[in-house]
Structures are given as structure tokens and as C-alpha cells.
Amino acid sequence: MNRWGAAARPPLDRLLVREKDNTAESELFFRRVLIMVCAVFVGLLAVSGRLVYLQVLNHDRFTTLSESNRVRIQPLPPTRGFIYDRRGVLLADNLASYHLEVTPDQTRDLEGTLAVIKSRIALSDLDVDRFRKLARRTPPYTGVPLRFQLTDDEIALLAIDLYRLPGVDIKADLPRRYLVKSLGVHAIGYVGRIDETEMSKLDPGQYSGSTHIGKTGVERSYEDLLRGRAGYEQVETNAEGRPLRVLNRTAPTPGQHLHLSLDIRLQAVAEKALEGHNGAIVAIDPRNGEVLALASQPVYDPNPFVNGIEFSAYRKLNTSKDRPLLNRALRGVYPPGSTIKPLMALTGLQYGVVNRASGVFCAGVYRLPGASRKFRDWKRSGHGAVSLDRAISQSCDVYFYDLAVKLGIDRTKAFLDKFSLGRPTGIDLPGEKGALLPSPQWKQKVHKQDWFPGDTVSAGIGQGFFLATPLQLAHSTAVISQHGKVFLPRVVHATEDPGTRVKNRVEPRSAGTIEVKNPRFWDAIIGGMIHVVEGGTAHKIRSPRYRIAGKTGTAQVFTLGQNQSYNARRLAKHLLDHALFVAFAPVEDPRIAVAVIAEHGGGGSATAAPLARRVMDAYLLDQYDDKLDAGLKLVPEVQRDGLE
Amino acid sequence: MDWNNGRRVLGLIKLDWPLLLGLLAVSGLGLVVLYSAGQRNMDLVLGQAMRLGLGFAIMLVLAQIPPSHIRFWSPWLYLAGLLLLVAVMVVGDISKGAQRWLDLGVVRFQPSEIMKLAVPMMMAWFFADKALPPRWLPLLAGALITVIPFILIAEQPDLGTALVVGWAGAVALFLAGLNWFIIIGLAAVLAAVVPLFWTFVMHDYQRQRVWTFLDPESDPLGTGYHIIQSKIAIGSGGIYGKGWLNGTQSHLDFLPEGSTDFIFAAFSEEFGLVGGCVLLAMYFFIIARCLYMATRAPNTYGRLLSGSLTLIFFIYAFVNSGMVSGLLPVVGLPLPLFSYGGTSLVTIMAGFGMLMSVHSHRRNLTR
């Protein structure tokens, strides 16, 4: 038997199948068990040794840490990146301020503590209510903010008494500040306190110490970039939990600055133009998809949301019938009305159901073969003989009723889908709606009804079930101006590293090109759109300085009876038609595409078209309101090289 | 029933008194510590006492079953466990949720828990009729019996349980008389492969994760916080401890998981080095007693099963106390008979039941 276990055997045995030998195996097992007993002993001895190391050799150090001082890991939240407009105008930053924080567990008597604070500084019932609400949903050993934006005097008053008030702290923070107030709020969005549902989805390590998160707009869609990465420090604290000494520190990484493609001056022009209407204006640079202005009226000031808006104020915003919180540019869905006609014409050309030379005779009314229901033209007397060009420029409904019926809804849907109608465009903002490009399948599913031929007729002029967002209309107009080249719309133009101040351009996101059978089809519909402004329904906005291609639209809200006539003066405002206008300019080298929707604005040519003209004038002719500039303190921070 | 009659009945019950007393002593101490660590929550203590009662009942029932029965069922239990592990994987894949549990409608149930018993049983069953020390082919088969469930459990991912299962198999091979040349050879190959793997195969982020695993204090916002606080709790306890109910670290909520995985820290804070060493000595007594029982087993099956089950108990105690004191990386294994809750308590007690069965039935078998 050798020393390590294997029993010595006769050599021959190695070649044969061995028999089991219980005695030998029992002895082998016994030796192995002895080894394991030694291993177990050594293992447990090592743990005991470790206990000696901790409890005897380092006892004093750990006692100090445990009893007189405590080590806490304090997260260091990163600084949120700033937001600039495309020229470097600062839109959102963080303003250093102090707030008062109370840790309920550490106060000896919470009510008494609150009373003492109230005797020193101004403390409204609102502050106390908010404090109690927040305190209820956080563990009692965490600090809860009581009063924001302490003044220097208040800090001095409190500082004297702080030693008598355990659990009360003055904390520095950097709350978000929106310098331009309500301007561009629907694009920029706002941050707010992290709520419980958000908390459950977040990475707790990254958000420890962070109290705010982007709720809407780019604040939300670029949250990860803007936030940065949390750091932490190991601090020794005294028995009351006040930090005494920093042992170890890992600095946080600040968030990236964002440069929007928005020009805040143009944004101001657009919002100003829309004033008095509910509606939206979206302006896009068709050459790269950059959104130049994204206005939705009415607006609201995002600043109160940062530290928790008062309930009554929020309710007022939320229940107002004008719905200021609704981002109409992305989430407002409207019948596109006649603004869809250029695309319908293109679809007709693509499938060969019309051509540039053929015409239709418009007698002011259209009937489906074998049916008695009349589909009326907006011009009761009719347009007479209409070609494709005139059908667009005069917005002849009968031409497009006929065209839609010849196309059928399936082909229409298949082709218009390429222009992001009926589906989100993919803009870098949250909550965009896809609106609706109807189909028989959709109607069967939602309304449990068959698709009637009349539904196709209405869809031909952008009515019926057809719905689109202002963003979709601006986007599809931009695509037309580029003869089918598609760029996804986006509001962020560049990111900037706050340390090195190096800017990184966000490259345009191309989504390919929409192919048509004959490239001249584009010229055909654009020609019609030019004639809309030059002698057509929008002739009043013709500019002597540049050429515009556009299309008016008037979307019916109120369906008239078969024999009634529309009289704006006799209808209540909320029954008036929506006014729409889409356009791009200059025709020769398009640099801006605009969509305007004024809810219940009446007619597209009278109400919406002039608003688009003001936006295009401002952008193309650099006509900005100096007073507006000065009033909003839109002083460019620093003009930096490299980018526009 | 007179006194003699009572003794006779007691004599018929198959169990091992020294082991039973050792287990009762540790469990009792555990309840006392739990009362303090659980912030004097009596419900917690009562719940744990019920669970312990159930564990002891299972142990006593299993101790009455002859080892030949246990041996007969070994491969079937193992196969069933494997199938359930695969089922959990498939179901988990579908639900995209946690992959450890199998919902049987009434009870949710962790198949990997079965494997802690089934792997030692299967290894013992497999080597029971093979000549030992094993030749190459049985050796390879034995390794496969361990590696398959190990991989399935590690994939869940449940590192703690995978470790226990892998250890049970490795120990069974060692006790079966695995040749020293093979052991040394394997160690050498491992030593050579790991650095190569580290340098050429792993990505940076994977290396980072291994580092955090080996050195949790580099991640003080995550697992490192536990270890830092746990070390303060133990260290501040000193030689004699702060006394029962006087631990500040655990009572002021600095110590996370103070009544579950980190109960050893709460215990050491209050009972000091003396208490810690007494507890470790009690564990050593239980392990030594069980290994002694293993050497007295009449056949290979009994020996391997007993030895392997005992060392499972050891790995729980060792890894947990080592982790809590900052000696070993953080692996989520409870301190046996001490930590609150845990389905593993039942498994461990079932293991002791089988040990007692093997030991107390040895005279009934022909050698």
C-alpha cells in the first residue's frame, strides 16, 4: 500500500477487471476523510484567524468607526448637462441653490422641529404638505426636502440653531432652470422629481442621490446623455449622521450638453404667430431633417414642475379645455384635409390612374356610380375642366374624389406609408403619435364595420378617418421638397462634452429615398404647389423675395347635412374648421418646410398660410423681432467655432 | 408503559444522539441571535422555529428509511431533478423572468435545491458498484454527473447553488479515491488556462465584473457596502462582544441583511471573538461527527453519500462566514441553521436525515 491511497496490487490485476475490495476501499475512504477533516479544520481556523484580525488587531479602528463615527457612502449625483439652441443660446441650466432637508428618523420630535423651523423662516402650508407627502413614501432615515431656494438671510437664521435641531440640514443642490420659460417647452420638456413607478425601473446605483429625471421633451429622450454618471464618497459621520471627513472620493461624470437644432428666435416667431389660436407649427430643414421650430399653443412654464408644481396649478393646466400640456406638434391628430392632395396626386401618377395631361370635369359635385349620395366640392359652382396642376392649385375636391376611387384605399395606404403618414416619423422626442391612415382592416377591427366606397372618397381629400400630426405633415412636405429623400426629423443637432467642450455633431439620419416611376412626377406636384401660392388658393402670401410651394387645407370638424351650407359667422368657434397649410421654400433650393395647424381657425388660405409666411420670412430673410430678442434676453453665450 | 418499555421504543427510533444534540444546540443559539438581529421581532423567531421544527421532522422521518431504499431512488431523483432544471430553463425563457422557480400552482419550487441532495446520491449510487479508486471511464462519467447540473444551475444564474452542487460532486470524487496525479494535473491545467483566458478571451467589462466579485469593496454603492458594514460590525464586537441586544451596527440599520445572509456579522458584533469561535467549534463538532459516521458506514454507497452531504454542510458554513468577514467573495449562501428563512434549511436537514439513516441502519446490513 503506497502512502497516498491507491492500494498496492499485484501487477496482473491492473490488466484485469478489478474486484471490489470493501476493506481496502474502507481504508482508502478513511484516509481521504482524514484529509478532509484537516481541510475543514484549516478552513474554519482561517475564519477564526480572520475574526482575530478584525476583532482583536483592528478592534479599535472598527470601534471608532462603529460607535463614535460611522462610515457612510454618499452618492454624488452628477451635474445635468445644459441645453442650448442651434446658435448657442442657453435654454436650460442648473442654478446653484440651497434647500432645507429634514430626516424624520433623526429628529427627536418631528412636529416640534417643524415648529421651530417655522418660527425662524417662512414656511407655507404648501411646503409642509409637500414634505409630508414625500416623507410618507420614503424610508424615515432618508432626508426629505422641506423648503427650496433658501435666501442668504434664511440660511444665516437657521445656521445658528442647526446644532439644536438634529436631522435638519441645509443642502446645496442644482435645480434645473429654464431660462426661456415657456418658449420651446414642448420640445425641451422638463425634469421633475422621480416618482415611484420610475424608481422601480431605474438603476438604483446610477440614480442614488439623484432626485430628478427628465419627464418630457429632450429632457426625457436624452436623459441618459444629460444625466451623466454618479460618483460617490466615503464619509465619516458623527453619531447624528453629520459628515465629518471624506475618506475616499470618486468624482461624478457630468452630463453632456445638448445643442438643439431649434433656433429659439424662430421658435419665438412661430409661437408668437400662433398666439390666439390653439394649434401647432413645425418647421424642418428638409436637407437633413433638423427641426427648426416646434411650436404648440398654448404653452406653459416648465419651471414650477422642477420642484413639484402646486396641485391647484397643475389641475388648472390639466383640466383647461385648451390643454396646454398637450404637445400638439407630435400628439395632436387632425384630419389633414386638402394638404394631402399633392401626395394623393403623386400616388395617382405613380399607379398610372391619372397623368399630367388628363383632366376631369368638375361640376361642383361627385357621385359614386350607381349611388345617390353627393360629395360636394368646396366650390359649389365647380371648377370646370381641371388638370392635375389646377386640381392642386385650386384644390379641386371632385378631381381627388375621382382619383381616390380609381386608386382604391389599399394602394393609397401602401404609398402614403412611405411618407410616415399613419405611423410615427421617428423623431427623437417621446410620445409621438402615429395618427391614422385608415384601411378596411382597421375599420373592421375598430368599428366592426365594412369599408364603404364613400370612405375612400373622403380619404381622397384627407377627411373621413384620415388623421395626421403636424409633425407628419411637415415631414412629408420636407420629403416632397427633396424629391423623395427621407431624413428622420430630430431636434438635437450636437452634443458637447462639458469638460473638453468638444462638440460632436449628431449626423443626419437618412431613411433612404422614395422611388417613383418617373422623377418628373415630383416636378408635377411641386408645380401644382407653386401655383397654389402663385395664383391659387394661397395667392395672398406670395413673396416678392423668394418662391414658395405650398398647399392649403381646411379640415372639417362639423359635418353638414346634405343640403346645408357652411356659414362661418353662424357657427360656434369650436365647430369652425381647422385651418391648415404646408409649404416649403425657396422652391429652387428648399431650406425650410413648414406645417401650420390652427384649430378652428376657419380657412387654410386665410388663417394658416399667413402664419407659415411669417415663419419662412423670419428664417429665410433673417427677419427677427429685435424687441422679442431683447425681451427674452436671448444673448448668445459664446459663439463657438466649428458649428453654425 | 413502564420505564423499560419507553427505553425500548426509543431504542427502535433510528437516530444519532450526539449529532442531534449538536444540531439542536446550534439551532437554539441561532434563534436567540435571530431575536436580536431581527430587531426583537418575535414573529420572525417563531417563523424560524416552525421552519426548524419542520426540518427536524423531515430529518427524523428520513432517518427511519433504510439506506437501501434511498439508494434505489437515487438515480430517479437525479433524473427528475435534471428534467425539472431543463423545464425551469424553458419556462423561464418564455416568461423572461427569474429562472429558478417552477410554479406548480400551489407551491413554487426550486429544482436546483433538489440537486444539492440528488448529486451526492447519484455520485454514491454510481460509484457504489465500481472498483475504487475509479478508472478513467467511471471517472469521466462521474464528472459528467456533476458538471451537467452545475452548468444548468450556473446558467440560471444561481452561482451559490451551482457552487454547492459542484463542490458536492468534486468531494464525492475525491472521497472515492481520485488519483493524486489527476488532482495535481487538473490544478496545473487550471493554473495555466485561467491567465490565458483572462488575457485573451475575456472582455474588459467581464474582467471588471470579476474584479468587483473578488474585491467587493471597490464597489461601495453595491455589494461593497454590505461588506464594509459587516466588517465594522464584526470588528467593533471585539473579544467579548457588545452583548446580546446591544449590537449597534445591526440595530441602527447599518448592516443590511442582518437576519439573513449577514446574521454572522450581527452575531459576532454581540458575542465577540469568543462567541464566533464557539460557533465555529460547534460547526466543527457537527462536521467531525458526521465524517466519523461516514467512515463507519458499511459500504461504498453509504460512505460516499455521508461524506459528500457532510461537506455540503461545511461549504455553507465556511463560505458564509468567510464572505461576511470579508475573506471570500460575496456568494449568496446562508449560514446553515442560523440564517432566517431559506429553503436550503429543509435540504440540509434532509441531508442529516440520510446521514443518520446510513449510520443507524448499519447493523441491519450484511457486510
Image (cartoon, coloured by chain):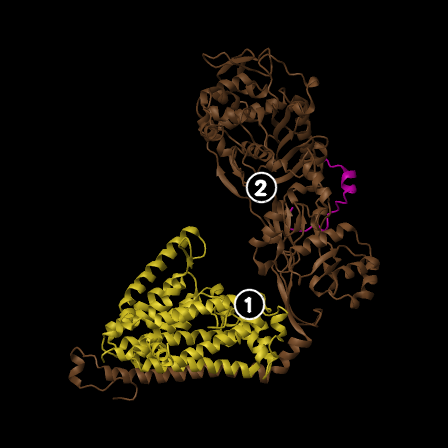
- Specify the amino acid type for callout 2: Gly
How many numbered discs? Answer: 2
| Label 1, residues with CA under 10 Å away: few <14, some 14-19, many ≥20 | some
- Specify the amino acid type for callout 1: Glu
The residue at which mark 2 appears reads as A431
Q: Which chain is yellow?
A: B
Percent across and percent down for residue A383 are: 57, 13
Quick check: can you spot residue A354?
Answer: no
Percent across and percent down for residue A357 are: 49, 17
Provide the chain ID for the residue under circle 1. Answer: B
Task: Name the main secondary structure of what is drawn in magenta.
Answer: loop
Q: Nearer the viewer, residue B67 or A303?
A: B67
* In the displayed structure image, the side of residue A377 where residue B316 appears, left or right: left
* B221, above or below B325, in the image: above
Percent across and percent down for residue A558 are: 61, 22
Which residue appears at 55% of the width and 44% of the height?
A508
Percent across and percent down for residue B139 are: 27, 73
| Numbered tag placed on residue B257 in the rendering | 1
Provide the chain ID for the residue under circle 2. Answer: A
The secondary structure type at the circle numbered 1 is loop
Q: Which quarter of the rendered picture does the N terminus of chain A lie within?
A: bottom left
Quick check: can you spot residue A88?
Answer: yes
Residue segment shown in magenta = A623-644
* In the displayed structure image, the side of residue B286 where residue A426 appears, left or right: right
